[in-house]
Amino acid sequence: MKRLLIPLAAAGLTAATFAFPASAEPHWATDPLAPKPADAYSSANFWLDANGAALRKATQYYWDFKNVPKLVGAQSKTPDDGKPGLTAPTGSVATATKVKNVNLPKTIGKVFFVDRSGKYRWCSATSIQSRHRNLVVTAGHCVYERGKDVFRKWVFIPGYYQGKAPWGIYVGAYAFTAYDLDTYDDYDGDYAFVAVHNGVELGAEKEVPLSEYKAWQGDKWIKPREISKEDFLKCQLNLGECWSEGEDKASDLVGPDHPEAVLEKVETTKAKYVAAKVGKGQGFKFGEPVVEQVSKKEWDDYKGPGDKGTGPDKAGNYSITHYYTQKWVKPGTSRKYFEGHYFIGVAKDLGRLGDVVGGQGFAWNQPMGQNVIAFGYPSAPHPDGDRPYTGLTPKYCMGKTATKTYQINTFKVETHQALKCSMTPGADGGPWLIKYNNKRTGYVNGLTSTFADQDGNNRIDFISSPYFDGEVADVYNQASLAETKAIVSPKGELLQ
């Protein structure tokens, strides 16, 4: 696991906050996800681009069914770890979009991320009350990949329903988890609290003049529009963004000073572009190289002469650099003419997560055997192949937790609480709420970590959660101190 020393000012924390005795190990560890607004905006755009194509492509986090564990009884009473405690839930302040499933809490949603192999994954999660109303809680294995590092492009979408993000998308800034999970991959600490940036809503576009396009600091692009030959010649006289396309014969090629000459840009290789002369002439350079941000699939599929590079950059983004040279031709009847129109992407800042959907309460050192309701988005089939869930909509289980804690021999688990429930993977990270009421709020006292087949019939019948003790409260308290901000301005421009 890569260790992080966050600049305290950037995280909104003080040196006193992090102080602990020199002889003691901390109970918590922290790692960055996308603390910079530019990286956060890129992550949001990655998932929402093309009407959420990446969201629909994602599958539930992989969980190996070859070793479906059984829960082994460990302790017959609640671990003795100090006095029980509660942090009250909060409701939302902002007016929310109307969606289906209104009887389910708005705080429930999915987290999406990209794993080390480049696959798009998701887990379940919930918004939880915190000092800065910006905290998400989920399973640790939905943030950290088997003791290696945090997942890339990590985002939370509350109220996720059939590919929709009704209350926006919230990009992870900092992750906080148990020291033992971070260091030893210990599933007794299989939980994580993630401080997220303000929510954003993407998708709107606005056509603007070239001057505004150049000054815009957010997302922007040029769209071609076909025009007549006459308008094309006027565009060239006014030095506008215009070009022609079509097949040319050798006799159609002319010099730049020919009275009927028009300019066409031709994509070429980097080597030919570098070798080309600068100025006005046949085969000379046409402007500066153009860097295009693309998806992983677009990058894989690209076969043109542009430069693909060696893969994603440090932030995990893919790009292609295009190079162009000049071609001067006489207008022909088979040619088409285009001019560029300038568009900017207008993102909307939705505010803090807790102000939009509220936050569930938090409980620790609670007695076993309490009534709980566990939420999640189950999706994977049972080990026998039956698949009763789609993962498109949230489901829940209700019941009492077992009166003893459990260990799991195939994982590093010594103290988990258990609940009889048939939800399958995809529900990973979904909250277990005690004291749930008709306001659709309660107290997070656990979350789905592992799935068990207790009766040996190749079907999931129990789920388990780390026991939320004083160490979990320590991690929660540290995460609650982390401040995050908006990633776009009220105008929709990307903040620095």
Image (spheres, grey):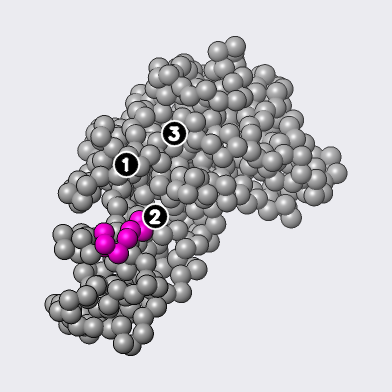
Q: Amino acid at mark 2?
A: Lys
For this orientation, the residue located farthest to the bottom is 250
* Apparent side of residue 207 relative to residue 123 in the rendered image (left or right): left
In-front residue for pair 62/49:
49
Residue at the spot of label 3? 168
- Label 3 or label 2, whichever comes before in sequence order: 2
- Numbered tag placed on residue 151 in the rendering: none
Would you say 417 lies left or right of 480 here? right
User: 117 above or below 128?
Assistant: below
At a point 25% along the width and 34% down the height, the residue shown is 491
For this orientation, the residue located farthest to the top is: 438
- Where's the C terminus, which quadrant? top left
Q: Amino acid at mark 1?
A: Lys
Q: CA distance from mark 2 to mark 1?
A: 41 Å
Which class describes the residues within 10 Å of circle 3: few (<14), some (14-19), or many (20+)? many
Element on which disc 1 rests: strand
Disc 1 and disc 3: Cα gap in Å? 20 Å
Q: How far across and down, in percent of the image, does residue 429 sit?
A: 57, 37
Residue at (85, 44) in percent of width and height: 457
Which residue is nearer to you in this view: 56 or 251? 251
Q: Which mark is residue 206?
A: 1
Q: At 26% across and 40% down in the image, what residue appears?
A: 493
- Expressed as whole percent of the image width and height from the top left, the position of residue 35 reads 32, 44
Q: Earlier in the sequence, mark 1 or mark 3?
A: 3
Counting residues from the start of the chain, the first of labels 2 and 1 encountered is 2
